[in-house]
Image (tube, grey):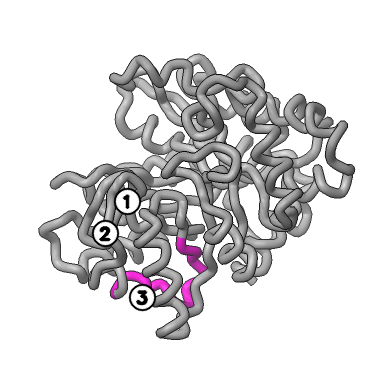
Amino acid sequence: MKLPIIDTHCDLLSYLAKVPDARPDRAEDIACALPLLQQGNVKMQVLAIYTDVFPGSMDIASIQGQKFKQLLEEFKEELCHANVEFLQRINEEDRISVVAAIENAAGLASEDAPIQAAVENLDVLIKETGRIAYISLTHHTENRFGGGNYTEGIGLKEDGKKLLDYMSGKKIAIDLSHTSDLLAEGILNHIDLEHLDIPVIASHSNFRGVWDHKRNLSDEFAQEIMQRGGIIGVNFLRAFLDNDRPKRILDHILYAFERGFGDQICFGADFFYTKDFPDKSRHPFYFPIVENASKYPSLLENLAEKLSKEQLEKLAYQNAQSFFLKTWA
């Protein structure tokens, strides 16, 4: 089944920035290489600007912003900017549209930088890439903005509030995929208390109701995203699906429809460069059913027995299409 695909998270830019002689069309290196995206009929791909929490985080983010720009220049026949016009005619498009996002706001301001650096660097990255789709305040660990998903008892910090205040009205979503529960709660409360205009999403998260993992969403937060008109991108990583059940991703997707999140669920595969990952217990990172971006048509075929054509279209592209059309209008 070959429907257009919108995917809300991959780490192609991080691969291009850190791996010597990296190329976006090298399918043997990374599961979201351009040929694999083409085979999977991906029409819009969000490219994360990912950094860890360390003194050089702002420089790494800047390099990835430059890589985004170079990517569009070098592969202009294959790629273009994601925008409203492209989304409106997505079924007629041959190229893949791309848009940048921030995974970990440490890339905007390292721990010892003035908070104004976050504002200035965000503006620079928007100018460099054309648009920022969403921002995750944290990754796995704590930073100056709040607590990551592997932290306990760390919520939204003052610098996190300041960044949220600046994001309001700028058509940039806040991403809950890497927050601690306390940080997610703090973000939602601050948005409501200050009446901020910020869409809320989870760009690459699964469901704790299927697989109890800190990286996955509780039904409570999934319902908050639903009520705020956001989207939830199902993550393809084995560790967040179920380490031992190769087709567990089907259960996460079906769970979304069964629990009333049928207008939120989309794809957020989280493909990244895995060859240098030190923890060998994580290998293979992906089950064969979703091992690379070429697998979207066969994944949809696997779901066709349980989901209607209309539901498959929502999952493949329509939910994400509707969200970004509404957000960017």
Question: Which mark's residue is nearer the viewer, 1 or 2?
Answer: 2
Q: Nearer the viewer, residue 97 or 137?
A: 137
Relative image position of residue 26 (x, y in whole percent): 50, 19
Q: Residue at x 31, y 56 (%)?
A: 105
Disc 1 + disc 2, Cβ < 8 Å: yes
Quadrant housing residue 124: bottom left
Q: Residue at x 24, y 52 (%)?
A: 142
**Is residue 166 inside the magenta stretch?**
yes
Quadrant that contains the N terminus: top right
Relative image position of residue 286 (x, y in whole percent): 53, 23
Q: CA distance from mark 1 to mark 3?
A: 21 Å
Q: Residue at x 75, y 41 (%)?
A: 4
Relative image position of residue 177 (x, y in whole percent): 46, 50
The kind of residue on which mark 3 rests is Tyr
Q: Which residues are magenta?
A: 162-174
Which residue is disc 1 drawn over? Answer: 148
- The image's mark for residue 154 is 2
Residue 249 drawn above or below residue 191: above
- Is tag 1's residue or tag 2's residue first in the polypeptide sequence? 1
**Is residue 145 inside the magenta stretch?**
no
Which residue is disc 3 drawn over? Answer: 166
Q: Nearer the viewer, residue 250 or 72?
A: 250
| Local secondary structure at mark 3 | helix
Residue 116 drawn above or below residue 33: below
Q: Residues within 10 Å of mark 1 (few under 14, many from 20)?
A: many
Q: Nearer the viewer, residue 281 or 33?
A: 281
